[in-house]
Image (tube, rainbow, N blue to C red):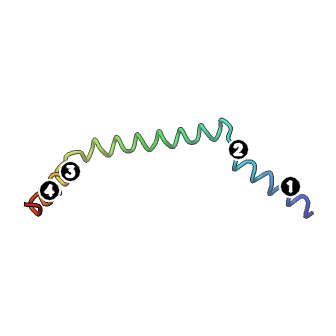
Amino acid sequence: MRKRLTTALVKAGNVLTKRDGDQMTGWLIVVLVVVVVGAIFMTLYQGSITDIWNSIVTKITSLLN
């Protein structure tokens, strides 16, 4: 029984550390989702981000003067 448990744990560890195409495909999908969500976020909130950035720059320049 102990040998079977050890074998199962070793096999599970090998699956988690594999560097084959399935893992690469998974990472590519994750990167694609992050890029798409970031692009949508930037498109929807571009005006707000610009306003916040401009107010930060204005405050910093007023503190330096």
Residue 44 in the figure: left or right of residue 28: left
Labels 2 and 1: the sequence-earlier one: 1
User: Dot 1 surroundings within 10 Å: few (below 14), some, or many (20 or more)?
Assistant: few
Sequence-wise, which precedes: disc 4 or disc 3? 3
Q: Mark 2 points at which residue?
A: 18
Residue of label 4:
55
Q: Which comes sooner in the sequence, label 1 or label 3?
A: 1
Q: How far apart are marks 2 and 1 (CA)?
A: 16 Å
Q: Which of marks 4 and 3 is in front?
A: 4
CA distance for labels 4 and 3: 11 Å
What amino acid is at disc 2? Lys
Q: Where is residue 12 in the image (x, y as percent from the top left)?
A: 76, 53
The residue depicted at 80 percent of the width and 51 percent of the height is 11
Give amino acid for label 1: Thr
Q: What element carries label 3?
A: helix
Task: Residue 3: name its quadrant.
Answer: bottom right
State the residue position of label 3: 48
Q: Which amino acid does label 3 sit on?
A: Ser
Q: Which of marks 2 and 3 is nearer the N terminus?
A: 2
Residue occupying image coordinates x 41% and y 41%:
35
Mark 4 vs 3: CB contact within 8 A: no
Q: Nearer the viewer, mark 2 or mark 3?
A: 2
Q: Which quadrant holds the C terminus?
A: bottom left
Q: Which residue lies furthest to the left in this view?
A: 65
Disc number at residue 7?
Answer: 1
Looking at the picture, does residue 14 appear above or below residue 1?
above
Quarter of the view holding residue 9? bottom right
